[in-house]
Amino acid sequence: MTENEPERAKRELEAAKNGEDPNALLDKIEDESPTRASSALALRISGASYTEIAKFLGYSSAYRARAVVERVLAETADSPEDAAKQRVLADRRYSRVLQSLMGRATNPKDPEHLPYARTALAFIERIGKLYGVDAPAQAIVYTPDTEKIEQYIAGITAMYRAEEAAEADIIDVEPELD
């Protein structure tokens, strides 16, 4: 922690008490360079914790490191191309972990073969979800236009009136007396 952390915490607390977003102060408080923010993201992608990122890059807390990483992710995921880049980065992380598991997961003589295989399958499933391989089948929803809806209502109304008329005939018939 830096020596300004207690003062920052007080300002954030005051902002929260006044109904303001204390995270809004991050833009004003942290002297953020694009290189430092990119480094924070790169460290996070490689598996570093927010505490490690804060210590390595000199952020005042893990909370601040997390806020920077999330801000960079939000800024870079605005377009489909950026989302594809994020997918590739996530795929690299998953593949890296999966590669480390596969040796033991595919060796039936390894005493811990099954736990490794289960973990490897979980990563394979996650990669499938990442690229939409496991996406559900698309459902086609038919939405009729206004004219078809009005025709349907008119048909139902006519049928209802016909039933009403038939019931009225039955009720209105006077019984024959012998």
Image (cartoon, helix red, strand yellow):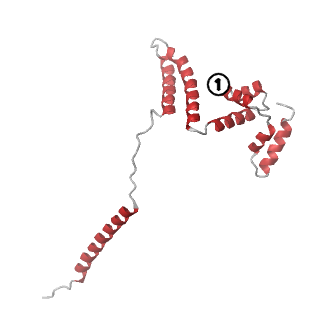
Q: Is residue 38 left or right of residue 88?
A: right
Residue at the limit of the structure toward the left, as seen here: 178
Q: Could you tell me which residue is drawn at 58 percent across and 24 percent down?
A: 93
The residue that mark 1 highlights is 47
Residue at the limit of the structure toward the bottom, as seen here: 178
SS type, badge 1: loop
**How far across and down, in percent of the image, does residue 157 sit?**
33, 70
Q: Is residue 18 above or below residue 177?
A: above
Q: Quadrant of residue 161?
A: bottom left
Q: Quadrant of residue 145?
A: bottom left
Q: Could you tell me which residue is drawn at 77 percent across and 34 percent down?
A: 32
Q: Amino acid at mark 1?
A: Gly
**How far across and down, in percent of the image, does residue 171 sit?**
25, 80
> Nearest the camera: 50 or 147?
147
Q: Is residue 175 left or right of residue 110?
A: left
Q: Is residue 110 above or below residue 169?
A: above
Q: Could you tell me which residue is drawn at 33 percent across and 69 percent down?
A: 154
Q: Quadrant of residue 152?
A: bottom left
Q: Could you tell me which residue is drawn at 66 percent across and 38 percent down?
A: 75
**How far across and down, in percent of the image, does residue 56 sit?**
76, 24
